[in-house]
Image (spheres, rainbow, N blue to C red):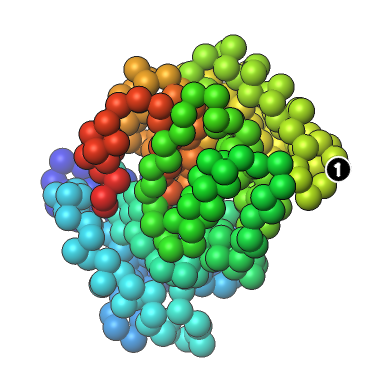
Amino acid sequence: MANQNPEQIARDNIDSALMRSGWVIQSIKQINLNTGIGVAVKEYLTDVGPADYVLFVEGKPCGIIEAKREEEGHRMSVHEGQSEEYANAKLKHLKNEPLPFVYISTGEVTRFTDFTDPKPRAREVFSFHRPETLRDWSKRDKSLRRRLLDLPSLQKEGLRDCQINAITKLETSFKENRPRALIQMATGSGKTFTAITAIYRLLKYAKAKRVLFLVDTKNLGEQAEQEFMSFVPNDDNRKFTELYTVQRLKSSYIATDSQVCISTIQRLYSILKGGFFHLVLCSILFPALNKIMHWTTFRTALSAGIAVGTVSGILTGLIVFIILKRSTLWLVEKLNLNQ
């Protein structure tokens, strides 16, 4: 409506975004937690005041949303302390534990924090997670980032020194909660083999649910598929494709039981689903780098990603670039790796 204030406009946008993600919106005066898997209750009372939205999944509180007007979108981090305060508050009529999933949103810009992570940090997402996703996360013993701490020492048989160094340093970066990293490897050093080894370890030991392997051309996708099919880990006699399902995307259909999906950047961008992939691995040529760097919604839609190739990188929470040319210092500055 034309006479709405900025706060009301933000809440309307948040309502629409929640409904698109499968949430039922209810007011504090008309609560019925049995109307769906996920119910978002407005202005729910807590011991520190009313929360803008409290998220219930299967009748149990699991998260909150702190609403902010659109003008606050550029300074969302300032309000993270307030949202954490609500997450730790006691809800009226309930004996709840602290709520693990916290959002700050203007309806246009949304930042999400998972307080089950070992070192929680907010990250931008392009939509609210579906109730089914938060339900599954609530039932897990550890978050993905906490499971990264459990990665065992790398078995070095059959690996080159440069591959051992790359994988070990990458996993150390993950364990230290450093979301961006840079790997530099020479031509012919086995970058794809290194990448598949890292993927195998994340699927097996960190229980990553699904990995996206991005390529810049169809031919690179076909080559990557062949390398996955021929890869045999050094701790198992079976091929990768006998252990995990690998799908090269040829249409918009993504099989829910695929653990590795290979796709061109162009196809993936047209069918992107938030929260669908735990890990992104991108094999691209250098000219494609700027294309990815400017896809803000694409980069923030994924919880983690790795890129491998001439230039490659993890596209959200965790970022890794494997390069052949260009100054390392130039890339560090260009890709904000010091953040």
Residue ID at (31%, 69%): 83
In the shown orientation, is residue 252 left or right of residue 103? Answer: right
Q: Say what amino acid the circle numbered 1 marks.
A: Asn
* Nearer to us in this view, 143 or 287: 287
In the shown orientation, is residue 22 left or right of residue 210? Answer: left
Residue ID at (63%, 24%): 224
Neighbour class for label 1 at 10 Å: few (<14), some, many (≥20)?
few
Kind of element beneath mark 1? loop
Q: Please determine whether, in this image, residue 28 is positioned above or below residue 35.
A: below
Rendered location of residue 166, percent (x, y): 51, 45
Q: Is residue 175 visible?
A: yes
Rendered location of residue 143, percent (x, y): 56, 63
Residue carrying label 1: 237
Residue ID at (58%, 37%): 195
Rendered location of residue 252, percent (x, y): 60, 23
Rendered location of residue 334, percent (x, y): 24, 35
Q: Please determine whether, in this image, residue 274 is positioned above or below residue 193.
A: below
Q: Residue furthest top?
A: 219
Residue ID at (51%, 87%): 95
* Nearer to us in this view, 93 or 111: 111
In the shown orientation, is residue 78 left or right of residue 32? Answer: left
